[in-house]
Structure formats: structure tokens, C-alpha cells
């Protein structure tokens, strides 16, 4: 696991966007680099991104929009899978995660129609939808780069504390903490759905590169638990410690409780430029 401590949230967003850009520019059939092949799916398939919602990736999405608009970064050959979706929101609700990703990212890029897929939170047969979602990720060749945020209770995706570290896509019940945290996106706290469909921790672990973004003092304690604490279902994000290629991108505030912060800084400063994340 590589922990990168940066001066501010803008630097976190730029570095995350660099990692996405590097993947996207490697393009179709560019062959293996790092921990696995890009877009190992059907012939002609390109890179596969994993997209998170919530506040943490918003600045990264803004930076990717800017690079598309002003630097010609094309996403025409990219496919993407969402981490999770609320269950039970009306099809036209602006807080459906599919709508959020469309608004914040997809609508501004040159993605092909149907290139972005998320779990269907309105599915009549939820277990069948979850199985189909797992199969779709697999058919695409798996996720090359998964962007992640961390919940204040340690959730990853919507895998709340107690989630199996090997879980696959399924329905979960949000904790009271998560519903309170997410109330800021809704007119009333009791509008926040109780249920979600989320990729499991086992699903997330299959992605070839995991990039966790955390900024602000409110994330400091849980980041320290996830990165330096024991691997435990009580802190689902601690499962990152079991993955061979993880980048944890933090601003100073989110890094404040790390005991090995100076070591992480030394490692990153001394890293060869060619290595990337
Ligand atoms: C969202 C998701 C969640 C969020 C987490 C942090 O798709 O999977 O795990 O990443 O709740 O949310 P923010 O970034 O709003 O603090």
C-alpha cells in the first residue's frame, strides 16, 4: 500500500486524475503495465474505470472534465462501473448515483452510449441484478482502476462494518451514521434510503488498482484505522491492506492521525518519476 500525503485537496484530485489519465492514454491493446493488463475483456475493449460517488471524488471528476475539455483527453474507449446505488429512489431522483455520475462526469465526456453501468436500484429481482452486475464486470475484463472514498464508519462502497471481506455485490442496510452523513444530499434526513446495492469487498478487491481518496480532518481517525490498524470487518476499508496495488491519496488534514506519516513522505519523495502510482 502506498500512502501519499499532499498539501491540499486540489493536489489529491490532480494526482488521482493523473492516474486515470495514464490509464486512459495507455488505450486499447497497449499491453500490460504494473499489476495487470488494461481492459483484459473482449477484443477491442479499452480501460475499465470504477467510479465512486459522494464528495471525495468530485474534485477529481472536475479535473477530468477539464482535461477532456481543454487537453483533448478522450474517454471514447473507456467503460466504467459504479460502486453502488441506492435502492428505492424514484427513477428521476437527482441523488440516484447513476444520475450523480451522469451529472458530475459522464455527460461532459465523450464516452460511448452505455459505457457507464451501475447496479439497478429499482430491480424487481435484487439477487438476480447483483449476479448480473458481477457478471458484467467480469465480462468487461474486470476493473483496471477503482476510485474509492471512505465512510466515517470505515465503509468502502457501502460495505458497512461487519461486511464480509470476501463479499460480492448484494443488498446492504446503511448504518445510522452513514444515513446521517449522507443526509446533506437530501432535503430531509428521513429521505435517505435505508438500503443500497453495493459491490462487495471481494468485488472491489478484484480491481487491479485501488485509489482511495480522503480529504479533511473528519476522515483522519478512520483513515488511520484503515491504513495502520488491524485488518477487520469492523473497519471494512482495512481490507485495502490485503490488496497488492493500493494508492491512498490524502491531504494533510486527513493524514493527521497516521503514525508513519514521515515514512510515507520519505518514500514518496524518493520515488522514481517513471513509477507512477
Ligand atoms: C460512494 C461510496 C461511499 C463513499 C463514502 C464517502 O459511492 O461508495 O463509500 O465513498 O461514503 O463519502 P464522501 O466522499 O461523501 O465522504
Image: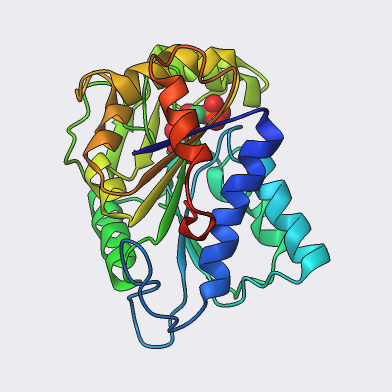
Say how the picture is coloured: rainbow
Front residue (pair 161, 29)? 29
Above or below for 238 versus 105 = above
Asked if residue 225 lies left or right of residue 164, the reply is right
Residue in the image at 55% along x and 64% along y: 22
- Residue 79 horizontal/vertical position (percent): 49, 68
Residue in the image at 62% along x and 70% along y: 75
Asked if residue 249 lies left or right of residue 209, the reply is right
Front residue (pair 74, 159)? 74
- Residue 143 horizontal/vertical position (percent): 37, 60
Residue in the image at 23% along x and 57% along y: 131
Task: Say which quarter of the image contains residue 182.
Answer: top right
Residue in the image at 64% along x and 26% along y: 185
- Residue 195 horizontal/vertical position (percent): 38, 31
Front residue (pair 174, 164)? 164
Above or below for 141 versus 240 = below
- Residue 125 horizontal/vertical position (percent): 28, 51
Q: Residue furthest bottom?
A: 43
Asked if residue 45 lies left or right of residue 107, the reply is left
Front residue (pair 270, 16)? 270
Task: Indicate the quadrant containing the N terminus: top left, top right, bottom left or bottom right.
Answer: top left
Residue 94 shows up from this direction: no
Count of picture labels: 0
Task: Say which quarter of the image contains residue 252.
Answer: top right
Q: Residue furthest front?
A: 270
Residue 14 shows up from this direction: yes
Amino acid at each position: 500500500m502506498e500512502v501519499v500525503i499532499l498539501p491540499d485537496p486540489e493536489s489529491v484530485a490532480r494526482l488521482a486524475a493523473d492516474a486515470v489519465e495514464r490509464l486512459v492514454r495507455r488505450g486499447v491493446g497497449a499491453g500490460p503495465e504494473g499489476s495487470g493488463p488494461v481492459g483484459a475483456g473482449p477484443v477491442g475493449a479499452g480501460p475499465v474505470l470504477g467510479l465512486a460517488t459522494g464528495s471525495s471524488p468530485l474534485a477529481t471528476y472536475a479535473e477530468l472534465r477539464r482535461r477532456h475539455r481543454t487537453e483533448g483527453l478522450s474517454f471514447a474507449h473507456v467503460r466504467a462501473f459504479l460502486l453502488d446505488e441506492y435502492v428505492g429512489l424514484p427513477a428521476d431522483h437527482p441523488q440516484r448515483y447513476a444520475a450523480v455520475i451522469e451529472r458530475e462526469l459522464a455527460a461532459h465526456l465523450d464516452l460511448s452510449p452505455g459505457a457507464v453501468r451501475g447496479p439497478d436500484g429499482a430491480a424487481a429481482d435484487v439477487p438476480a441484478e447483483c449476479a448480473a452486475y458481477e457478471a458484467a464486470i467480469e465480462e468487461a475484463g474486470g476493473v483496471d482502476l477503482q476510485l474509492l472514498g471512505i465512510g466515517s464508519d470505515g465503509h468502502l462502497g457501502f460495505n458497512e462494518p461487519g461486511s464480509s471481506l470476501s463479499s460480492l455485490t448484494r443488498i446492504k442496510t446503511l448504518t445510522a451514521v452513514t444515513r446521517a452523513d449522507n443526509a446533506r444530499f437530501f432535503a430531509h434526513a428521513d429521505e435517505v434510503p435505508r438500503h443500497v446495492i453495493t459491490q462487495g469487498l471481494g468485488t472491489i478487491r478484484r480491481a487491479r488498482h485501488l485509489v482511495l481518496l480522503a480529504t479533511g480532518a473528519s476522515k483522519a481517525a478512520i483513515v488511520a484505522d484503515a491504513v495502520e490498524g488491524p485488518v477487520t470487518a469492523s473497519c471494512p476499508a482495512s481490507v485495502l491492506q490485503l490488496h497488492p496495488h493500493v494508492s491512498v491519496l490524502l491531504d494533510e488534514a486527513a493524514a493527521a492521525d497516521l503514525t508513519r506519516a514521515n515514512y510515507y513522505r520519505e518514500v514518496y519523495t524518493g520515488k522514481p518519476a517513471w513509477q507512477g502510482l
